[in-house]
Structure formats: structure tokens, C-alpha cells
Image (cartoon, rainbow, N blue to C red):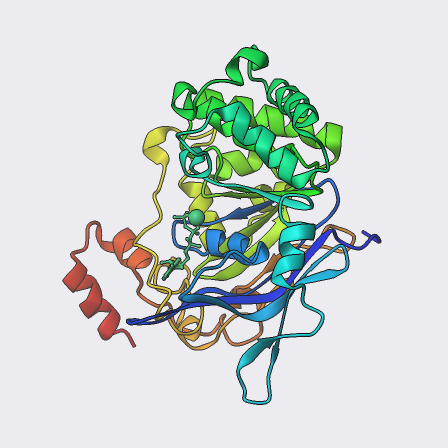
């Protein structure tokens, strides 16, 4: 790819300063979005997907703070954090001001669709009026023209009889219809990039399929790029061109969607794939990922996945893996952060007993036994 990426995220770090400690919610992630591309951000609940997207939009609220990294959009620095003379993070001179973010970027250039449409739509105002007002504020048009655009947008996203439905209240719409309204709102200012944070999670599979078809359609027609946040690899397969897999604040694998599925490199991605239904598997063959994701306040040492990894060895507890491109020559970049691919002695290290290996070896293991087993491994 020779063209500059539309969006470039470099070493982004966002933390929450809570009474219990510092939550390293997003801990140095980097990825790019090219024009017309749908890029997935996947991972279990708590991986940091939403914090990553709200950081890109600069919508992180206290006690959260972006403490490092750069986000460049069309050459503009949406985020640009440097270290000040006092050692504390501070905004660089190049970083857009809050006003510039509001006036130039949010809605117009980058729009966001949230998981719960009821949160984004005001229940006491009619759907059409909300859409119209949004268009009036963000585009330089009068009320009449804004209304016309709003009706057009509702039609565009597949709302039947848009003139009539214009005067409905949000609760008179189904979940799928409300999500379509949010997509209409996101599209209203013809942004170059739409960030969709689990927009289909609350919907049933049929409606989800319709929304995905709609997004494909819109992508083709408007050449809009998407960052698509989900915990569902089935959706990723349907919709994404490239995928970033997140675990505990980090991106641990990043690849073209086909390579992610058919040339999986990270054990966590492998585990995620095992936990979704595939045509060649029966439901009984599905393996949920063992254990729960540890707290982001105190992430495990070394590789953060080592406590749940079936392939973990002693070295995984000690060394933090770095991202490396493991693609074959000529193939698209395929980055993975796993010690198996580094020369740090993984081959010669002893296997670690983890939640995953203990469960495989000894059937159901009580939590206390698992702790003992971890304590006395060599
Ligand atoms: N306001 C907050 N205060 C403290 N911690 C927070 C806050 N918001 C998020 N976090 C923490 O940041 C981490 C990442 O959360 P985030 O919401 O980004 O996860 P996610 O990947 O979007 O999960 P989900 O799939 O459930 O939406 C979690 O450990 C979460 O507890
Ligand atoms: Ni989220």
C-alpha cells in the first residue's frame, strides 16, 4: 500500500486512575485504516476495544486519560502526547484543540456508532427530528433541507416509509431499526471513517445479517472506511478486510482476515476461533476459552496471555513479546506478539501449567488445586 493510511494509531496508551490503582486499559496499540477498508478490533469483554475507540475520538472521560501515543487522521494529529519537562505526559503543539476536534473531526470526518442505540437516541424526541437537528448542526443547511436529507438517509438505511416513520419515537422502533437510524446519523455528514462499537451485538442474527449487508452496500457506494469493534469472530469473517485481535490492552495479532482464519499464529486467536461455531464442527466440539481475562490493573508479567495459554512455557512468564511480522515474502503483513516466534529460548523452556493446560490434563480442576499446581511447577 503506497498511499498514506486514512487513520494511523501509534503506540496509543490510555489509563484510568482509580482508587484501586491504574487501569492500563489500552497499553500501546498501533494499527492503520486505509481508505475504503473495514478494519476489525476484536477481543473478549474488557480487552480495551471501547477505550481504544473513545480514545481515537478523544471522548475518554475522567478518571481516564490518554497518556501516550499518536493518532493521525488525514495528516492531522488527533492525539499527540509527548513527555513534558516534569516527566508527565502532555499534549504536543500539533495536537488538535478540543474545539478543532468538535468542529472539524467528530461527526463530519469520523462518526461513531455505539453499542446501545437507546443511549444515543433521546427517548423523548421523535427520531426524524433528532436526525434533522444533527444534520442542521453539522452541515451548512437550513431546516427544510435538513429534513429532506434526513428522510433520504432513513430511506437509504432501509427504513420503510421514511416520511411516516420520521415522526416516530425511538421506542416505536425495533432494535434493528434503531441501529439503522444510528447508521443514518453516522452517515449524515458523509464522514470518511465510521467507528462502530459492537453495533450489532444486541440484535438477533437475522437483523445482524441485514445490517452487515447494509454496511457492505454503503462501503461500496460511499467508499467509507470502518473500524468495526466486536467480540464475534463470525461477524469479523463477514465484514472485515483486516483484523486486530486485542488482549488486555494490547494487540496480539494483526492480519488480513483470511490469514487470521487460515494461518492463525497466536494461541489466543486460536482459542477465540475454537470458541465460535464453524461449518465443519458440531456444537459439542466447541471449546470455550479457559479462564477469565485477568484485571487490567495488574496484568500478568511477561506475555499477558500466559496464565490461560495452552502453549505457555516458563519464558512466557518472564519476557514480554513484541510485535513481529511473520508473513511469507510478498504476502500482506501478518503481525503477531508471541514468544514462539522470537529467539528467547521458548523451544528449550519448560511447559507452564496454566488454567488451560490444567483443565486439559486433569478434567475439571478446582480453583484452589489450579493455584497449587501453578505454585509448585519447576
Ligand atoms: N471509567 C472507567 N473507569 C475505570 N476503568 C475503566 C473505565 N472504563 C473502562 N475501564 C476499564 O478499561 C478496560 C477496558 O474496557 P473496555 O470497555 O474498553 O473493554 P471492551 O473491550 O470494550 O469490552 P466490552 O466487549 O465488554 O465492551 C477494562 O478493564 C475496564 O474495566
Ligand atoms: Ni466495549
Left or right relative to 349: residue 266 = right
Q: Residue at (38%, 49%) from the top-left corner?
A: 45
Image x and y of residue 353, in percent: 30, 65
- State the image coordinates of residue 186 (x, y, percent, origin top left): 60, 36
Going 53% across and 76% down the picture, which residue do you hit? 344
Image quadrant assignment for residue 142 = top right
Residue displayed at 70% across by 51% down? 104
Q: Is residue 219 left or right of residue 11?
A: right
Whether residue 204 is visible: no
Q: Is residue 279 above or below residue 230?
A: above
Instruction: Count numbered badges in the picture.
Output: 0
Query: Quadrant of the image for the C terminus?
Result: bottom left
Between residue 320 and residue 129, name the one nearer to us.
129
Say which residue appears at 35% left-offset and 30% top-offset: 283
Q: Residue furthest bottom?
A: 85
**60 or 135, which is in the foreground?**
135
Decide if residue 144 is in sight here: yes
Looking at the image, which is closer to me, 265 or 74? 74
Residue furthest out toward the right = 2
Residue 202 occupies which quadrant of the picture?
top left
Q: Is residue 77 above or below residue 85?
A: above
x and y percentages locating residue 228 in the rendered image: 56, 42
From the top left corner, tell me how far across and down residue 256 is, in percent.
65, 46
Report the side of 361 relative to 117 (left or right).
left
253 and 196: which is toward the camera:
196
- Left or right placement of residue 46 versus residue 4 in this view: left
Amino acid at each position: 500500500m503506497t498511499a498514506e493510511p486514512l487513520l494511523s494509531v501509534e503506540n496509543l496508551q490510555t489509563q484510568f486512575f482509580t482508587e484501586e490503582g491504574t487501569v492500563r486499559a489500552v497499553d500501546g496499540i498501533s494499527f492503520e485504516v486505509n481508505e475504503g477498508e473495514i478494519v476489525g478490533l476484536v477481543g473478549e469483554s474488557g480487552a480495551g476495544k471501547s477505550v481504544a475507540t473513545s480514545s481515537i475520538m478523544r471522548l475518554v472521560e475522567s478518571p481516564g486519560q490518554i497518556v501516550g501515543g499518536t493518532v493521525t487522521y488525514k495528516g492531522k494529529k488527533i492525539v499527540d502526547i509527548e513527555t513534558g519537562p516534569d516527566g508527565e505526559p502532555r499534549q504536543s503543539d500539533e495536537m488538535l484543540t478540543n474545539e478543532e476536534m468538535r468542529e472539524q473531526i467528530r461527526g463530519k470526518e469520523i462518526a461513531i456508532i455505539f453499542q446501545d442505540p437507546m443511549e444515543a437516541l433521546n427517548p423523548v424526541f421523535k427520531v426524524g427530528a433528532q436526525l434533522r437537528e444533527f444534520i442542521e448542526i453539522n452541515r451548512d443547511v437550513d431546516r427544510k433541507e435538513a429534513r429532506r436529507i434526513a428522510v433520504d438517509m432513513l430511506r437509504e438505511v432501509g427504513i420503510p416509509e421514511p416520511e411516516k416513520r420520521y415522526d416516530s419515537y425511538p421506542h416505536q422502533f425495533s432494535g434493528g431499526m434503531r441501529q439503522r437510524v444510528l447508521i443514518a446519523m453516522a452517515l449524515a455528514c458523509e464522514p470518511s471513517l465510521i467507528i462502530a462499537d459492537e453495533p450489532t451485538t444486541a440484535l438477533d442474527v437475522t437483523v445482524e445479517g441485514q445490517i452487515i449487508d447494509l454496511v457492505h452496500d454503503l462501503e461500496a457506494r460511499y467508499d467509507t472506511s470502518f473500524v468495526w469493534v466486536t467480540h464475534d469472530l463470525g461477524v469479523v469473517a463477514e465484514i472485515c478486510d483486516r483484523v486486530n485481535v486485542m488482549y488486555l490492552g494490547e494487540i496480539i495479532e494483526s492480519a488480513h482476515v483470511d490469514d487470521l482464519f487460515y494461518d492463525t499464529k497466536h494461541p489466543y486467536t486460536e482459542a477465540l476461533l475454537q470458541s465460535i461455531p464453524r461449518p465443519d464442527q458440531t456444537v459439542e466440539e466447541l471449546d470455550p476459552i479457559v479462564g477469565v481475562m485477568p484485571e487490567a490493573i495488574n496484568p500478568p508479567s511477561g506475555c499477558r496471555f500466559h496464565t490461560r495459554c495452552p502453549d505457555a512455557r516458563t519464558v512466557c512468564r518472564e519476557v514480554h513479546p513484541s510485535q513481529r511480522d511473520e508473513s511469507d515474502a510478498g504476502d500482506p503483513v501478518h503481525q503477531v506478539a508471541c514468544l514462539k516466534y522470537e529467539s528467547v529460548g521458548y523451544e528449550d523452556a519448560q511447559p507452564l501449567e496454566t488454567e488451560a493446560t490444567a483443565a486439559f490434563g486433569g478434567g475439571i480442576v478446582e480453583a484452589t488445586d489450579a493455584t497449587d499446581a501453578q505454585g509448585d511447577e519447576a
